[in-house]
Image: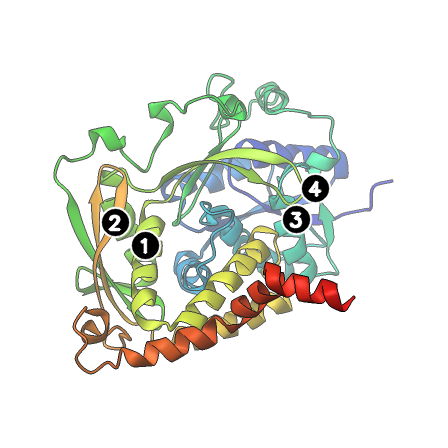
């Protein structure tokens, strides 16, 4: 039996799923629907959303501009942590979901809603990300997940449902990709991509030019960091969102930031995604270059290990968990001297570090050189003997003469 609901705040994008959810909620719950769209850098996708939401039955519409907050408080901490899921995924969608859910909850509480709804499928990660955020921020509100209730079983069914009600949607059966765009990336899933051997069509990509058609001359870009946070591009200080947009344009025209991966979803299903993350790819490379100068070995290795854990927490929807918050404090402390500028060369889809400088560099040209001035080579002999004691002892125990003595004692 359905729990009575009077007014629900829906995380609204104007895409296929949320476009049909408004009439579905009204038909099945008899409730009012408040559509909540959160601008995290979808560009032109936010245009006309208010009119569309009202036409499909929403009693109210809210568009929340969260671009700066997204860049400053979500993307940059993920970047600073070195959080990359399964080697390649830079967590664009995963990082946006907790912020969207937070803004949705704020609108729900301000407008007297007694429920929250999302358009995530019952197979995906996003349902977990949204609902864990809801539980953390407003556990008293009822959660509705239409994809876990209705009889619609595919995107084709959803397209038919929309057509029957005269609802315009941004996909067709001819191009049924599911896309998610924000400041950080554009993801492509579904349709022909569900066949892992299918090579993506050139027309699918939106943020990056085909690397083969990128300029024939390399372009260099200098990115500056302060305490692990990017602050300037080519010497110009920029606000967080503008900095990412600038690097997106630079990386995009050079074909940088494309990845095609099969990833492990939280619930255990493997899925294929193609991602375009031009600015993020440049930033990851640049930050690693500065860290190589400023972090000593043990700190750098531990940061890399915990960065993987941080990536899992974000991917698994645990943004508001105490562990992620504790790790945030760790990375903030560890990167206080990760300051400097890295120069990245961009050429036909590649982003390569070609230089790095820092006022806190631990690197010493004199120590790194082959010149022995100021260094006592004899010290290394004692170090090596001590370092090899465990190996030497183990070898002695397994050596034939030693084994013979042991056998004789028996």
Q: Give the mark count.
A: 4
For label 4, the crowd category at 10 Å Cα-Cα, with few meaning under 14, some 14 to 19 and many 20 or more, is some
Q: Report the front residue among 122 and 161.
A: 122
Q: Nearer the viewer, mark 1 or mark 4?
A: 1
Name the residue that disc number 2 marks.
352
Q: CA distance from mark 4 to mark 3?
A: 11 Å
Residue 15 in percent (x, y) is at 51, 34
- The residue under the point 49% across, 67% down is 302
Residue under numbered circle 4: 145
How crowded pointer 1 is (Cα within 10 Å; few <14, some 14-19, many 20+) is rated as some
Residue 117: image x %, image y %? 66, 46
Residue drawn at 53 percent across, 64 percent down: 306
Q: Earlier in the sequence, mark 2 or mark 1?
A: 1
- For label 2, the SS is strand
Q: CA distance from mark 2 to mark 3?
A: 36 Å
Q: Are marks 2 and 1 in contact (CB under 8 Å)?
A: yes
The residue to which callout 3 is attached is 128
The chosen color scheme is rainbow
Q: Which residue is mark 1?
A: 285
What SS does tag 4 mark? loop
Tell me which numbered mark, 4 or 3, is placed earlier along the sequence.
3
């Amino acid at each position: 039996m359905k729990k009575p609901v009077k007014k629900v705040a829906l995380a609204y994008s104007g895409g296929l799923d949320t476009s049909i959810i408004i009439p579905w909620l009204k038909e099945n719950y008899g409730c009012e629907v408040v559509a909540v769209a959160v601008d995290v850098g979808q560009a032109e996708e936010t245009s006309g959303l208010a009119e569309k939401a009202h036409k499909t039955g929403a009693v109210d519409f809210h568009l929340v501009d969260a671009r700066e907050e997204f860049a400053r408080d979500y993307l940059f901490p993920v970047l600073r942590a070195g959080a990359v899921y399964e080697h390649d995924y830079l967590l664009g969608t995963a990082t946006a979901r907790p912020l969207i859910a937070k803004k949705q909850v704020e609108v729900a509480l301000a407008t007297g809603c007694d429920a929250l709804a999302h358009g995530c499928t019952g197979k995906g990660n996003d349902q977990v990300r949204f609902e864990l955020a809801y539980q953390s921020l407003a556990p008293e509100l009822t959660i509705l997940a239409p994809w876990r209730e209705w009889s619609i079983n595919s995107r084709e069914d959803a397209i038919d449902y929309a057509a029957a009600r005269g609802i315009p949607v941004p996909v067709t059966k001819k191009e049924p990709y599911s896309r998610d765009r924000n400041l950080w990336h554009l993801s492509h899933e579904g349709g022909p991509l569900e066949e892992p051997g299918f090579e993506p069509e050139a027309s699918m990509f939106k943020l990056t030019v085909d690397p083969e058609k990128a300029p024939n001359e390399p372009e260099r870009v200098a990115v500056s960091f302060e305490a692990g946070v990017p602050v300037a591009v080519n010497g110009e200080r920029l606000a967080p969102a503008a900095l990412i947009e600038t690097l997106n344009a630079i990386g995009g025209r050079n074909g940088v930031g494309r990845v095609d991966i099969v990833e492990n979803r939280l619930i255990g299903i493997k899925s294929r995604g193609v991602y375009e993350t031009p600015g993020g790819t440049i930033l990851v490379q640049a930050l690693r270059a500065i860290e190589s100068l400023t972090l000593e070995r043990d700190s750098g290795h531990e940061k890399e290990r915990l960065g993987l854990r941080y990536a899992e927490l974000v991917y698994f929807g645990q943004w508001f968990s105490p562990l992620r918050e504790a790790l945030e404090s760790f990375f903030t402390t560890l990167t206080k001297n990760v300051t400097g500028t890295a120069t990245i060369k961009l050429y036909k889809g590649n982003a390569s570090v070609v230089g790095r400088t820092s006022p806190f560099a631990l690197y010493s040209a004199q120590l790194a050189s082959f010149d022995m001035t100021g260094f006592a080579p004899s010290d290394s002999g004692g170090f090596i003997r001590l370092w090899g004691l465990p190996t030497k002892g183990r070898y002695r125990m397994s050596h034939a003469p030693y084994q013979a003595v042991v056998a004789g004692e028996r």
